[in-house]
């Protein structure tokens, strides 16, 4: 039966584990689709899976293999399917249940040994939870019968749910796949094998079936089913959508990059108790953690979760936790702090220098550096408070007030050079160390005091908190901002610091077009800064959230940390990248290039702490909002006329 008139499945990008640009995220649906109807679509904030409705044949294969239940099919949703099959199996306990399509149901129903038949649009919508629910209801066996049209010449697509089910149950003969080629012999042979099996005890109760009826997520259904089949944790069998994480404890410094990159939170780092844990059932085998680890300490092995043990948190590494020197809260593993100290010493630096703040938690570093920028790594000023410059103490004293000795005013550091550069360490070695240094509370980059705010007539340099207002009612969608940003900041093809999304809300004839410019929000409490394990992302005193590409590992943790999708992978530099309000222009007293070029003047830039600045006045005179205020990051890019449907 052709199902081409049905709507195509849809993909929920928010839960899809595809991963950002450049990472090894999940590709299960892309690799599985028999018709090439699924493809990767580049977006300024990463990539997303897209289904081409014209190519899609509505076979359901993508929804069957999706490990995060992010693909919704409009025909026979997963929870309805598993309930249908479980209820039918419960009606024929100790019998054999056949699952097939309309093309083969006649031949299947006539065979002796088939006690019940379930007819589906396609076998490819099946996953292991459907088969486990049937076997758990007490049937002796389940046989899948599909014609060439049903399997789309790709019977291998059914191998994964068969593999998982056979691994979990006591006898692999309890589930079989038979391709309907017009002869009854293959089906009869499978039924004969099942006839010799003993009856399975009922494992899935009526209460379980009721819970399955409301369990949309594949992992949620497995949490109901797996405990009914044993207590083991994993089996070393390969199947799409599953994996087993192995950690080399000798190489791991517990930096947390893997936990940040994990799209399903199966990896978790708890700094307060210094433990890195994993839940085997939640691993979708996407390899993002392996790609993110700077120390090559992780290996992803093929494995299938079995029983209740797969749902328990497994400790990969535990260590003694270190308390913050400032607030006393436990926040980091001891080995991380020790490695940070070693890294600084290897770079010829003194780990006890105040600017490194070794042993201080991120929250206290933020608070300290905002009050005293000279304590931060990127803030070693050229001119010392004593008046000296270039390493010479201004008053000729033997010991400068800044702590530096003769010829070492402010430690002799150069304001434009991050610690470790030019120390003789190779880049990779230093960056690995920099990751641990930053994560251990050793580095919070900031720039010297100095910011810009602008009236509409002329820019004026003042200290403050820079921000922007974008009036969507004035934006004409010309994309001049996008083009000038790429030219001004040398952004490569496929990457965007600033872009304009085009949306249509409502239905004809009341449809309304919207142009939505997007760029970094330069939050007061940036998620990207907290996620960055090397200190490459830092916050200037004027509020600009900047990225130092010289110490970026391209681990893409910042992409996971930013809930707005405002960071991206710069393929030309092999680093992360993001908008910085054109900081180089700001430092020269100029406005960002996007503000300068906008023909409708929909962007207003300046000091949000100054009530007389242009953006402050605009905010006072108009109703504005920020992106996703409920997160609490304090975005400093404000919008006028932003519809609620687009505030995401």
Image (cartoon, rainbow, N blue to C red):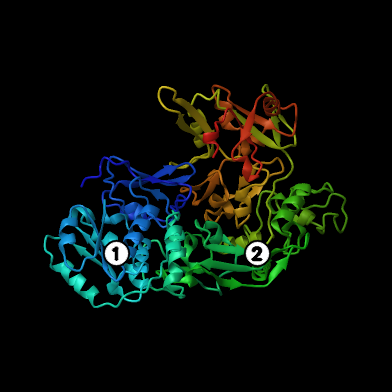
- Return the residue nearer the eye: 542 or 239: 239
> In which quadrant of the rendered view does residue 2 lie?
top left
Q: Residue furthest left?
A: 183
**Do residues under tags 1 and 2 come within 8 Å of each other at their CB atoms?**
no
Question: Callout 1: helix, strand or loop?
Answer: helix
Residue 425 in view, yes or no: no
Give me the residue at 78% from left, 49% from top: 372
Of residues 56 and 569, the one nearer the viewer is 56
Residue 40 location, x and y as percent?
A: 38, 47
The Cα–Cα distance between marks 1 and 2, rounded to whole angstroms, is: 40 Å
Q: Nearer the viewer, mark 1 or mark 2?
A: 1
Q: Residue at x 42, y 63 (%)?
A: 206
**Picture quarter with the C terminus:** top right
x, y percent for residue 573: 49, 49
| Residue 182 visible in the snapshot | yes
Task: Identify whether 302 is placed above or below 446.
Answer: below
Q: Is residue 167 above or below residue 179?
A: below
- Residue toward you, 489 or 217: 217
Q: Neighbour class for label 2 at 10 Å: few (<14), some, many (≥20)?
A: many
Mark before the other along the chain sequence, 1 or 2? 1
Q: Which residue is mark 1?
A: 159
Percent of width and height locating residue 183: 11, 63
Q: Which mark is residue 271?
A: 2
């Amino acid at each position: 039966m052709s199902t081409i008139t049905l709507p195509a499945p849809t993909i929920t990008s928010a839960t899809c584990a595809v991963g950002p640009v450049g990472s090894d995220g999940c590709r299960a649906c892309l690799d599985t689709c028999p018709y090439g109807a699924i493809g990767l679509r580049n977006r300024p904030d990463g990539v997303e899976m897209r289904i081409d409705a014209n190519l899609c044949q509505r076979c359901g294969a993508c929804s069957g293999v999706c490990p995060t239940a992010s693909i919704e099919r409009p025909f026979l949703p997963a929870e309805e399917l598993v309930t249908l099959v479980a209820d039918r199996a419960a009606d024929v306990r100790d019998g054999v249940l056949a699952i097939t399509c309309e093309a083969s149901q006649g031949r299947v129903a006539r065979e002796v040994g088939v006690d019940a038949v379930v007819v589906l649009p396609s076998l490819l919508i099946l996953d292991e939870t459907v088969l486990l629910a049937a076997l758990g209801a007490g049937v002796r066996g389940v046989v899948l019968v599909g014609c060439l049209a049903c399997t789309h010449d790709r019977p291998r697509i059914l191998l994964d749910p068969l593999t998982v089910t056979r691994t979990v149950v006591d006898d692999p003969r309890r589930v079989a796949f038979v391709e309907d080629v017009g002869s009854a012999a293959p089906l009869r042979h499978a039924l004969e094998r099942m006839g010799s099996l003993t009856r399975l005890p009922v494992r899935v109760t009526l209460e379980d079936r009721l819970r399955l009826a409301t369990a949309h997520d594949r992992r949620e259904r497995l949490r109901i089913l797996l405990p009914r089949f044993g207590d083991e944790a994993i089996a070393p069998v390969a199947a799409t959508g599953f994996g087993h994480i192995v950690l080399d404890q000798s190489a791991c410094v517990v930096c947390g990059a893997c936990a940040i990159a994990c799209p399903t939170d199966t990896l978790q780092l708890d700094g307060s108790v210094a433990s890195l844990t994993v839940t085997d059932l939640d691993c979708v085998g996407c390899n993002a953690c392996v790609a993110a680890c700077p120390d090559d300490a992780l290996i992803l092995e093929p494995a299938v979760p079995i029983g209740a043990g797969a749902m328990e948190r497994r400790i990969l590494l535990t260590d003694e936790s270190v308390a913050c020197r400032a607030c006393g809260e436990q926040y980091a593993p001891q080995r991380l702090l020790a490695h940070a100290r070693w890294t600084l010493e290897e770079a010829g630096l003194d780990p006890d220098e105040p600017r490194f703040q070794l042993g201080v938690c991120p929250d206290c570093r933020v608070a300290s550096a905002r009050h005293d920028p000279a304590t931060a790594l990127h803030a070693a000023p050229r001119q010392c408070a004593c008046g000296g410059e270039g390493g010479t103490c201004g008053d000729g004293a033997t010991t400068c007030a800044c702590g530096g000795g003769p010829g070492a005013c402010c430690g002799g550091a150069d304001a434009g050079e991050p610690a470790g550069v030019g120390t003789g360490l190779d880049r990779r070695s230093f960056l690995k160390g920099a990751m641990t240094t930053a994560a251990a509370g050793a580095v919070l980059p900031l720039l010297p005091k100095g910011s810009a705010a602008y009236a509409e007539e002329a820019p004026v340099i003042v200290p403050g908190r820079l921000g922007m207002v974008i009036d969507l009612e004035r934006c004409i969608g010309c994309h001049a901002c996008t083009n000038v940003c790429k030219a001004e900041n040398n952004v490569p093809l496929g990457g965007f610091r600033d872009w304009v999304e085009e949306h249509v809300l409502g239905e004809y004839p009341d449809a309304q077009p919207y142009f939505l410019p997007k760029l970094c929000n330069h939050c007061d409490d940036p998620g990207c800064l907290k996620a960055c394990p090397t200190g490459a992302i830092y916050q200037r005193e004027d509020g600009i959230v900047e990225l130092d590409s010289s110490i970026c590992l391209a681990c893409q943790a910042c992409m996971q940390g930013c809930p707005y999708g405002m960071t991206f992978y710069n393929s030309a530099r092999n680093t992360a990248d993001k908008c910085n309000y054109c900081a180089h222009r700001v430092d020269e007293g100029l406005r960002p290039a996007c503000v300068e070029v906008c023909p409708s003047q929909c962007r207003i830039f300046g000091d949000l702490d100054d009530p007389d600045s242009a953006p402050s006045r605009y905010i006072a005179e108009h109703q504005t909002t920020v992106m996703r205020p409920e997160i609490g990051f304090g975005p400093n890019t404000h919008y006028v006329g932003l519809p609620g449907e687009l505030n995401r």
